[in-house]
């Protein structure tokens, strides 16, 4: 495993000799950019001496690695083969005990079912124990998720505060012992013995709990349901407890989905809950006091974009700041010490402006820090606050070390109706920005957005010589309610108009050759790529759609048997836009070659969307290629699969718009 050698560099700063840039083959670029992140879900040990993280193996396999930051030695704690189990994250419950979350998807009678299990083990991989309620052959319902760790208790004694799902038994004959507990409860669990003591009794109405990070359950959420409790409405009610009380009191009543508060963190020192709440049609940050008065205080707002999160270092420690993403992601610290520390780190790492605190040791003396930029995928550092030493520990994408990557520039595109569309422009390194072949790359969602920084697909395209524009079309999240514009399905025409305006802007600026433009997208972005090729067929010479939505009515039907059915139904809506805004129903309008890419265990957008689109295109006599990946989900978590589809995409682009 190449990355483990990099990790073994430990705290010694990794220095990679500069390499002369040379023309690389399509296969070389596809393998390098298609490789999954070598580090994800990294956590620092309680004493700050080791880091635990997830790294990919061959195919969909994942490994949990522990690297000693003092000796430089790394070892595999455990692994999952990806068929269907994946390691999502691991964390220290004690210096020698860990908890890992295992996730996966299965196809049961045509329905894609997700599952999650929490598994505790020693850091050498021995003595594994499941932390959820033991499964029974008489379980009344399918047990998809067993629980959530709410509080790590400092990661020192091996106990965790855990939200656990209890499933009653049914149809058990000949036994006086039948489980009757039902719903979500909270237990204090010993991860070694799996013995537990109840903290909150299971409630079938509860949908989640929050602690103050110090072992006290202070907030409970209850999702409103309809249809005999089988369907979520999207409305949530929140309850709270005052200090030293066991009584649940109403904190926030049910509200319309677009007016709800979003709890982020409880600060025990303030005795308050940080929440996101709408102000002037944008998300602002507030605190709500967890006392009898429930006083609200506005903490932060931004006139252009939504506030999106708080910054907190360590389990149970105070909130030290908040974040938002404008042209670049920003963190604002109201803790003076961390504000000064962040400024010092920016000065020490001037080429890596994306800096955030990942984790800390139990006493806060050592910090794990991530730093990256648009042309650097990122690297992890260990910072010793006592000695003031900063040492590089790990590299996120070692396959790209020594390469000159593309710079990303925020730009603004004027729409036909005068709207100013934010976008990101990535230009191929070493090429004049004039008359280039170009790619329009709309993001997924639609209620999402791109951010300034490293993006593996746009960087791959830039490395192959293409200019890339990523428009934050109306329908994108993060810019307030007016820009969200209901959403990109109901108001697809506005979203497509913004995407088309971005393609035309590239040509009007002389950056792109108007006869050499293609469109590429993933999920909603794939939907947009197909729909744009139908709506503005003269703009594009090729289409690449990865895991695309192709029919809005089909998308609603896909979720009909899930608790989210009503939410999806309302989000997509009803009316002429369902027919008019479904690429599957207008396949004959596409005049250019299409590449479809999809995994058959996609729970977000069913595999059938691409199957039906391929059939419709072939029936209409269109040129289409369909890459199908057995056992892969919406994210295509397999470096080999990603390298293959990048290669096929590169071949299509070279054939249709050149390089």
Image (cartoon, rainbow, N blue to C red):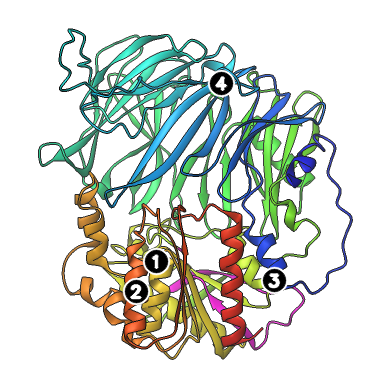
- Please report whichever mark, 3 or 1, sits nearer to the chain's N-terminal start: 3
Nearest to N terminus: mark 4 or mark 2: 4
Between discs 2 and 3, the one toward the N terminus: 3
User: Residue placed at 67% from the left, 62% from the top?
Assistant: 31
What residue is drawn where x is 36% and y is 42%? Answer: 114
Left or right of 642: which side holds 590?
A: left
Per the model, the C-alpha gap separating discs 3 and 4 is 43 Å
* SS type, badge 4: strand
Mark 2 crowdedness (10 Å alpha carbons): few <14, some 14-19, many ≥20: many
Where is residue 198 shown, x and y percent of the image?
34, 10
**Which badge, 2 or 1, is on the more N-terminal residue?**
1
Mark drawn on residue 121? 4
Marked residue nearer the N-terminal end (3 or 4): 4
- Measured from the top left, where is residue 518 in percent x and y? 52, 81
Which numbered mark, 2 or 1, is in the foreground of this view?
2
Relative horizontal placement of residue 415, taking residue 616 as reference (left or right): right
Check disc 3 and report the residue beneath it: 463
Of mark 1 and mark 4, the one earlier in the sequence is 4
Give the Cα separation between the discs numbered 2 and 3. Answer: 30 Å
- Mark 4 to mark 2: distance in Å? 45 Å
Question: Which residues are the magenta region?
Answer: 418-443
Screen quadrant of the C terminus: bottom right
> Percent x, y for residue 309?
47, 41
Residue 255: quarter of image: top left
Residue linked to disc 2: 613
Residue at 50% in and 73% down: 520
Q: Secondary structure at mark 3?
A: helix
Q: Is 421 situated above or below 481?
A: below
Is residue 406 in view from this perspective?
A: no
Q: Which residue lies at the image location 28% right of the left edge and 74% below the top edge?
A: 581
Location of residue 373 (image quadrant)? bottom right
């Amino acid at each position: 495993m190449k990355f483990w050698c990099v990790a073994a560099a430990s705290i010694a700063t990794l220095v990679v000799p500069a390499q002369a840039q040379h023309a690389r083959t399509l296969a070389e670029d596809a393998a390098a950019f298609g490789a999954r992140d070598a580090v994800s879900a990294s956590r620092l040990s309680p004493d700050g001496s080791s880091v635990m993280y997830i790294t990919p193996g061959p195919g969909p396999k994942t490994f949990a690695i522990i690297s000693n930051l003092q000796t430089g030695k790394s070892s595999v704690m455990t692994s999952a083969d990806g068929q269907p189990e994946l390691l999502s994250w691991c964390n220290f419950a004690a210096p020698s005990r860990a908890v890992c979350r295992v996730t996966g998807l299965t196809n049961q009678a045509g329905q894609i079912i997700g599952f999650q299990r929490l598994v505790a083990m020693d850091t050498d991989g021995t003595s594994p124990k499941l932390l959820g309620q033991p499964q029974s052959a008489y379980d009344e319902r399918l047990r998809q998720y067993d629980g959530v760790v709410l509080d790590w208790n400092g990661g020192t004694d091996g106990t965790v505060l855990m939200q656990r799902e209890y499933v009653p038994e049914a149809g058990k004959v000949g036994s006086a012992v039948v489980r009757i507990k039902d719903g979500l409860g909270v237990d204090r669990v010993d991860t070694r013995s799996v013995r537990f003591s109840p903290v909150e009794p299971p409630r079938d109405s509860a949908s989640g709990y929050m602690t103050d990070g110090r072992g006290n359950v202070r907030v409970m959420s209850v999702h409103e349901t309809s249809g005999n409790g089988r369907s979520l409405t999207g409305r949530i009610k929140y309850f709270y407890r005052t200090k030293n009380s066991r009584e649940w009191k109403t904190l926030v009543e049910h509200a319309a989905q677009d007016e709800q508060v979003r709890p982020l963190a409880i600060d025990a020192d303030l005795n308050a809950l940080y929440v996101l709440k709408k102000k002037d049609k944008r998300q602002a940050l507030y605190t709500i006091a967890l006392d009898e008065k429930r006083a609200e205080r506005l903490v932060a707002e931004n006139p252009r974009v939504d506030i999106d999160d708080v910054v907190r270092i360590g389990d149970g420690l105070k909130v030290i700041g908040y974040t938002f993403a404008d042209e670049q992601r920003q963190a604002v610290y109201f803790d003076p010490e961390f504000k000064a520390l962040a400024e010092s780190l920016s000065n020490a790492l001037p080429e890596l402006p994306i800096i955030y605190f990942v984790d800390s040791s139990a006493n806060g003396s050592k910090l794990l820090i991530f730093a990256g930029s648009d042309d650097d995928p990122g690297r992890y550092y260990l910072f010793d606050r006592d000695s003031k030493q900063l040492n590089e520990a790990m590299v996120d994408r070692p396959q790209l070390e020594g390469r000159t990557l593309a710079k990303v520039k925020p730009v603004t595109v004027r729409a036909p109706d005068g709207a100013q569309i934010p976008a990101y422009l990535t230009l191929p390194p070493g090429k004049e920005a004039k008359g280039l072949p170009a790619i329009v790359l709309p993001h997924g969602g639609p209620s999402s957005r791109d951010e300034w920084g490293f993006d593996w697909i746009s960087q791959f395209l830039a490395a192959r010589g293409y200019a890339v524009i990523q428009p934050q079309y109306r329908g994108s999240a993060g810019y307030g309610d007016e820009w969200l514009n209901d959403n990109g399905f109901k108001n697809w025409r506005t979203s497509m108009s913004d995407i088309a305006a971005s393609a035309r802007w590239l040509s009007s600026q002389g950056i792109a050759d108007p006869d050499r433009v293609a469109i590429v997208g993933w999920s909603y972005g794939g939907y947009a790529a197909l729909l744009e090729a139908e709506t503005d067929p003269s703009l594009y010479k090729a289409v690449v759609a990865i895991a695309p939505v192709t029919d809005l009515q089909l998308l609603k039907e896909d979720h009909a048997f899930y608790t989210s059915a009503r939410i999806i139904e309302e989000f997509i809506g009803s009316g002429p836009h369902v027919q008019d805004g479904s690429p599957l129903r207008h396949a004959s309008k596409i005049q250019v070659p299409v590449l479809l890419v999809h995994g058959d265990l996609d729970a977000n957008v069913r595999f059938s969307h691409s199957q039906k689109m391929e059939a419709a295109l072939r029936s209409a006599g269109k040129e289409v290629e369909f890459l199908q990946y057995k056992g892969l989900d919406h994210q295509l978590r397999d470096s080999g699969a990603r390298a293959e589809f990048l290669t096929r995409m590169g071949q299509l682009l070279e054939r249709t718009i050149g390089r």
